[in-house]
């Protein structure tokens, strides 16, 4: 099975690599380089004049209370989304792993939300939780709970966390289920014979054996919460009320597209890029080695 | 994340815009690219005007393209200009006016275009609050006024009746509004009043109607060194009232921009302050008797009420790119085509029809007269409230001419954010307005700095 295929000459492998390299260069490397360059400039919107200002944009961004607020929001948001999405997915996967009737149907249903576009999922949540047109929103108000995420920052944060986590549960579910199914039955049976109850079996046998999956999913979920939740926030709260749900990625959009402040927006996206690079290094260098396989 | 950088967006716009620039064959009419930001059904009505123009003469063909919302259209035009593929005409919302005026080589002022092409448009016949919004400080026309609205009050006559209020005498002052709201609440109405466009209506319009400045330098008309004046006593008083009314259940905050639009036609709120453009939707959706009235004012403020200010958009003429030189990268025929198109949309017949079809105000007195003589206002009572609001109190003052501040898109968001914080009881009305001043001033100084360099 480990027969190696070796190309004769260099032309053909180069040719085969070319499309991928071209895509990477045009859609990843080039825009990233442009962003880095732009982050060093002060420019009017139309690009009629630009001045090289060195790291001034970065200094401005880091000193800006609005950016720090967005960073704090992002920390709360990303950790809540990751914990909620992982916790719920793990629970559902453990339940689905049991021998139950209609297993396939149940699993398919759980995987479905992943196919829903972020903006669509946000609209679905809006129809549930809008204070005056939402099913649950109206019910909450009728029951005496003052629910208005358009004015209450904590409620708005809660809503975008739930909507974002809901979408990610399916993805986590698939991986957890696969992870659970790859745990040898013999190990579990041995533990059972030793007298370990189901809960104990879960925490001492299943969970440690799932740790590579969990760790992988944690990184994926953090990256998701950081970068792919723009649609949900844009459709639900637009970063409001006040700036209660403005995350770093949303602020990049607002400053660049709405406010046409290109230098600052570029500096912010470069900071995010540095963050992702750091996260990736941590994943490969340190943590992955300590995970119990 | 790399996919989200602006450079990628610019590259995408470049790729999309390039085919549109292909030259037409010599015998074919001269093509004029026109980008607009009006969704359906308004966009369709606008494109109908364009196709009528194309059918009216053989030499020019205006090609309209919908580019998404106003901010998306704006950023699209900016990116296209940077890659030397700007459209000839772009529709830009009124808050982008300050940014466009400072755009130097990117734009061709309408007065220059008209002089160069020898086309004459009678701007003197335009309503002062409309043309003034788009004029330079010395009165030269910078962009072509088109779809303009203003803010009015809609009220539910059935609910007024239920609360024992006269359905044919809507409240005129804020004091009367408050009294009416109390009665409506006593009659069991959960939402006595709400507002759309919180920054535009409860801040910009309020200050204009009371002849108070929003910023120094005549709201920025006289120069980029303007400073915000939101912390003035009237603004703080009104903000304080809104917060107080919200706490007492007389006022409901329905969200930013047009988010609260639905609360009136659905029959939830008894009084709503909204764009006159909401009228079409209310006609279509409201299942109750309703009326419109001018925005209220504080009767104890001397000099009030004056004219309200406009919203909506105007058409800007753009040069092709940063290195297009004297000709702007266009042929004489193309410039002529743009001017002819403007002459066409300026005709009172076209304007009057647009006004009647859409609920935007007529931008010319002639089209107003035309509509009146056709008996439109008798058949549609209240349809003239918007234009009456724009003409209230005689000639516009420095405070009621409009707003000419760079980066105003951002400032409007700032105002809405600080208002929300006040409604959440996180800060007092005074603190909210002062915080908005401070943050908005930072935006103004930043804009001044970026554009002072552009001017050099």
Image (cartoon, coloured by chain):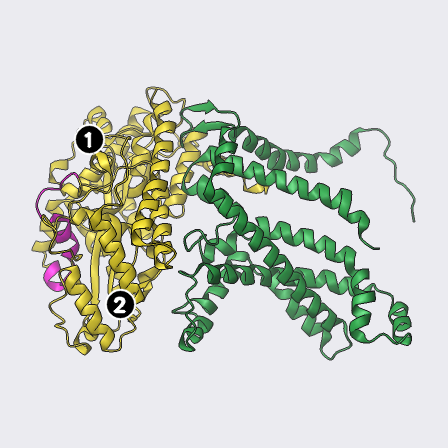
Chain colours: A green, B yellow
* Residue drawn at the location 24% of the way across and 39% of the way down: B215
The label on residue B137 is 1
Which residue is painted at 72% across and 68% down in the image? A93
The magenta stretch is: B376-398
Q: Position of residue A135 (x, y in %)?
A: 45, 73
- Using the image as rendered, state which of residue B394 and residue A209 is in the foreground: A209
Cα gap from disc 1 to disc 2, whole angstroms: 41 Å
- Residue B12: give its label: none
Q: Nearer the viewer, residue B86 or A182?
A: A182
Q: Chain of mark 2?
A: B
Residue B75 lies in the magenta-colored region: no
Tell me the residue that label 2 is attached to. B250
Q: Position of residue A53 (x, y in %)?
A: 48, 24
Q: Residue at x 64, y 33 (%)?
A: A25
Q: Quadrant of residue B175?
A: bottom left
Quadrant where the image shows the C terminus of chain B:
top left
Residue B354 visible, this orientation:
no
Verify CB contact (< 8 Å) between mark 1 and mark 2.
no
Furthest residue toward bottom: A101
Of the two numbered discs 1 and 2 in the rendering, the one whose residue sits closer to the viewer: 2
For the point 9% across and 55% down, which residue is it?
B372
Q: Is residue B106 above or below residue B266?
A: above
Residue B166 shown left or right of residue B232 in the figure = left
Residue B401 pos. (x, y %): 18, 41
């Amino acid at each position: 099975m480990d027969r190696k295929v070796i190309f004769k000459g260099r032309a053909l492998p180069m040719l085969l690599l070319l499309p991928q390299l071209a895509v990477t260069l045009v859609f990843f490397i080039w825009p990233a380089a442009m962003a880095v360059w732009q982050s060093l400039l002060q420019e009017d919107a139309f690009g009629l004049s630009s001045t090289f200002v060195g790291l001034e944009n970065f200094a401005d961004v880091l000193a800006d209370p609005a950016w720090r607020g967005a960073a704090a929001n992002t920390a709360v948001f990303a950790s809540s989304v990751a914990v909620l999405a992982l916790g719920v997915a793990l629970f559902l996967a453990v339940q689905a792993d049991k021998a139950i009737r209609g297993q396939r149907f149940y699993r398919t249903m759980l995987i479905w939300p992943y196919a829903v576009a972020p903006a669509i999922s946000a609209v679905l949540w809006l129809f549930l939780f809008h204070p005056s047109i939402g099913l649950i929103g109206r019910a909450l108000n009728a029951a005496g709970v003052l629910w208005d995420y358009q004015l209450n920052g904590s409620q708005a944060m809660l809503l975008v966390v739930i909507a974002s986590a809901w979408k990610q549960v399916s993805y986590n579910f698939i991986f957890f289920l696969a992870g659970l199914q790859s745990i040898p039955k013999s190990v579990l049976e041995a533990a059972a014979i030793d007298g370990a109850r189901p809960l104990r079996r879960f925490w001492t046998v299943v969970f440690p054996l799932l740790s590579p999956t969990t760790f992988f999913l944690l990184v994926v979920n953090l990256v998701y919460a950081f970068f792919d939740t723009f649609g949900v926030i844009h459709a639900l709260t637009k970063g409001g009320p006040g700036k209660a749900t403005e995350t770093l990625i949303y602020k990049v959009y607002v400053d660049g597209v709405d406010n046409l402040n290109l230098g600052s927006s570029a500096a912010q996206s470069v900071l995010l890029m540095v963050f992702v690079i750091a996260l990736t290094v941590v994943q490969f260098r340190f943590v992955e080695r300590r995970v119990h396989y | 994340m790399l996919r989200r950088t602006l450079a990628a967006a610019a590259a995408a716009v470049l790729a999309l815009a390039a085919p549109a620039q292909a030259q037409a064959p010599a015998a074919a009419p001269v093509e004029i690219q026109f980008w607009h930001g009006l969704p359906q059904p308004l966009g369709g009505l606008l494109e109908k005007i364009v196709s009528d123009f194309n059918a009216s003469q053989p030499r020019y063909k205006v090609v309209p393209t919908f580019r998404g919302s106003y901010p998306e259209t704006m950023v699209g035009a900016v990116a296209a200009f940077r890659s030397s593929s700007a459209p000839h005409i772009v529709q830009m919302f009124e808050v982008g006016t300050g940014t466009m005026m400072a755009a130097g080589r990117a734009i061709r002022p309408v007065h220059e275009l008209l002089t160069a092409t020898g086309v004459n448009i009678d701007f003197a016949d335009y309503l002062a609050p409309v043309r003034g919004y788009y004029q330079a400080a010395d009165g030269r026309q910078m962009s072509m006024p088109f779809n303009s609205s203003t803010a009015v009050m809609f009220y539910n006559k059935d609910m007024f009746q239920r609360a024992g209020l006269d359905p044919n005498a809507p409240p005129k002052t804020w004091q009367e509004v408050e009294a009416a709201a109390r009665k409506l609440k006593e009659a069991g109405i959960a939402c006595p009043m709400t507002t759309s466009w919180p920054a535009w209506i409860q801040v910009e319009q309020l200050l204009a109607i009371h002849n108070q400045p929003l910023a120094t330098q005549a709201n920025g008309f006289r120069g980029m060194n303007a400073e915000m004046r939101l912390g003035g006593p009237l603004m703080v008083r009104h903000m304080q009232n809104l917060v107080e009314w919200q706490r007492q259940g007389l006022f409901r905050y329905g969200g930013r921009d047009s988010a609260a639009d639905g609360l009136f036609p659905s029959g939830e709120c008894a009084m709503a302050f909204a764009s006159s453009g909401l009228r079409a939707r209310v006609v279509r959706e409201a299942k109750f008797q309703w009326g419109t009235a001018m925005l209220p004012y504080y009767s104890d403020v001397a000099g009030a009420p004056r004219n309200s200010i406009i919203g909506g958009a105007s058409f800007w003429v753009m040069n092709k790119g940063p290195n297009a030189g004297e000709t702007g990268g266009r042929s004489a025929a193309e410039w002529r085509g743009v001017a002819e198109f403007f002459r066409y949309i300026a005709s009172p017949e076209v304007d009057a029809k647009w006004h009647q079809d859409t609920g935007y105000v007529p931008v010319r007195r002639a089209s107003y007269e035309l509509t009146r003589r056709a008996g439109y206002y008798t058949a549609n009572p209240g349809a003239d409230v918007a234009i009456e609001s724009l003409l209230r109190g005689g000639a516009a003052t420095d405070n009621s001419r409009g707003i000419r501040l760079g980066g105003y898109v951002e400032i409007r968001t700032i105002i809405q954010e600080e208002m929300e914080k006040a409604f959440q009881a996180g800060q007092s009305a005074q603190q909210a307005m002062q915080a908005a001043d401070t943050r908005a001033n930072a935006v103004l100084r930043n804009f001044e700095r970026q554009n002072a360099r552009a001017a050099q």
